Structures are given as structure tokens and as C-alpha cells.
Image (cartoon, rainbow, N blue to C red):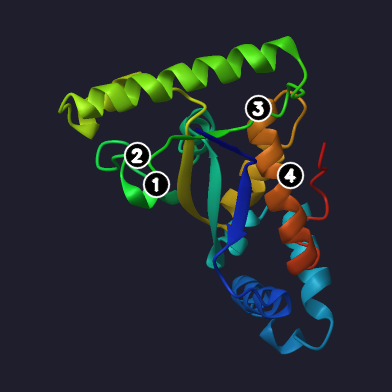
Amino acid sequence: MKIIEPSIEILDDIDGEQILRKLERAGRVCYKSEGKMADGTAQKFIQSIIGRGHESVIEHEKVTVLVTCDRGVTHEIVRHRIASYSQESTRYCNYMGDKFGNELTFIKPCFWHEDAPAFATWKACMQHIEDTYLELINQGVKAEQARAILPNSLKAEIVVTMNMRSWRHFLSLRSEVAAHPQIRQIAGMILNEFKARIPFLFDDIKNT
């Protein structure tokens, strides 16, 4: 059994300034004000667009992110539209195979310290699930059947592609204190990366 931290990876080579220039070019078509484009105008224009709620303009750019989290979090992620998803399949993945290290991998819950009784109880349960999964596979049960016992804590990889408007909605909603702690953890990682790579577009979203 392996226990890991959640993580994210940006799969695009992001040029934040280029993204802003493209969005400005697209947005100015609405007003036929392309002639006003110059060095430094993109920031003010995009901020104005967002401030007026005219966010359809920023749908012209997208970013793809690989998210490694527990399966419970993926169930929340895929509720968001508009987006494209490709997720690790427990039907076709036999976790007792060599490429998975012959073990199950679980995401460490962010809300329990390792010395907490609740964490010890959770860990014992995950070990029992791994032992049972292995026993089922050794009995000749197919992976698509053995997955019936796999928990939300199982590590899952999901590739998420959203346009900028959808990312803003996702990050605004999932960064709130009311969001589940584990999806808030993922949203915080993505938001920090976006703020570092894409100027101004996500600055108004708070990472709680």
C-alpha cells in the first residue's frame, strides 16, 4: 500500500502575455476597436471585460491540467461544464500488475494528521481494502469486478481541459471555504500556478 499527496501538473506551455493578447484581439472584434491594441493594453481591456461580466471572450483560450487526487474529488470535478475529461479507469487498470507496483495507492486525507486516531483507523481500512482486492484478483476475479470494493481515497489521475471562463468558475467555486477540503486543496494548487503564469486573469480569485 502506498499513500501519496495530491498534485497537479500543467500540460500546456503557457505564455501568459500571448494568451492576454489573443483574448484582447478576440474581444475587440465585438467593438471593432482592434486599432487601439498596443503594448500594455491587453491587461486593462481584459480586466474591463471581466468587470462587465463579458466573460464569453475569455473562452477563446484553454488550459489542460493533469490532476492526481482521490476518486471522491474526481466525482466533484466532472460536474463542471464546459470541460473535457480523461480519467484513469478502475475497470481496465489491474492494480496488482507490475506497472502499478502490485499495490493500491491512496491519497492522504488533508484533514487528519498522521498521529491522529482517525488517520490510523483510515489507514487500517485502506490496508484491509488492498488485501481484499489482492485476494479477489488471486481468485481470478476481473479488475472490473474487483473495483467494487475500491474507496473514494483511491488515487485517481484525471486530465482536465477547460477554457478560461470555465477555469474561473471552477476556481471561484472550489476555492471557497464551503468547498470540500480536498477539492479546495487541488483548486489552490491550480490557482497558484495560474496566477504565476497568466497575468491578471485570476488575480481577483482568492485562495482560501
Q: Position of residue 46 (x, y in %)?
A: 75, 66
Q: Amino acid at mark 2?
A: Tyr
The residue sitting at 79% across, 64% down in the picture is: 196
Label 2 to label 3, Cα distance in Å?
A: 21 Å
Q: What amino acid type is highlighted by mark number 4? A: Gly
Q: Earlier in the sequence, mark 1 or mark 3?
A: 1
Towards the viewer: 204 or 127 = 127
Question: Label 2 near label 4: C-beta < 8 Å?
Answer: no
Q: Which residue is mark 2?
A: 95
Helix, strand or loop under label 3? loop
Marks 1/2 in contact by CB < 8 Å: the verdict is yes
Q: Nearer the viewer, mark 1 or mark 3?
A: 1
Residue 8 drawn above or below residue 16 = above
Between discs 2 and 3, the one toward the N terminus: 2
Label 1 – label 2 distance at C-alpha: 5 Å
Q: Which residue is mark 1?
A: 100
* First-in-chain label (1 vs 2): 2
| Residue pictured at 63% horizontal, 48% vertical | 7
- x%, y% of residue 165? 60, 53
Q: Which of label 4 and label 2 is nearer to you?
A: 2
Q: Amino acid at mark 1?
A: Phe
Q: Amino acid at mark 3?
A: Pro
Which residue is rendered at x = 30% and y = 42% of the image? 93
Helix, strand or loop under label 1 = helix
Question: In screen coordinates, is 41 left or right of 117?
Answer: right
Frontmost of labels 1 and 4 is 1
Give whichever of discs 4 and 2 has the lower sequence position.
Answer: 2
Q: CA distance from mark 3 to mark 4?
A: 15 Å
Report whether residue 100 is seen: yes
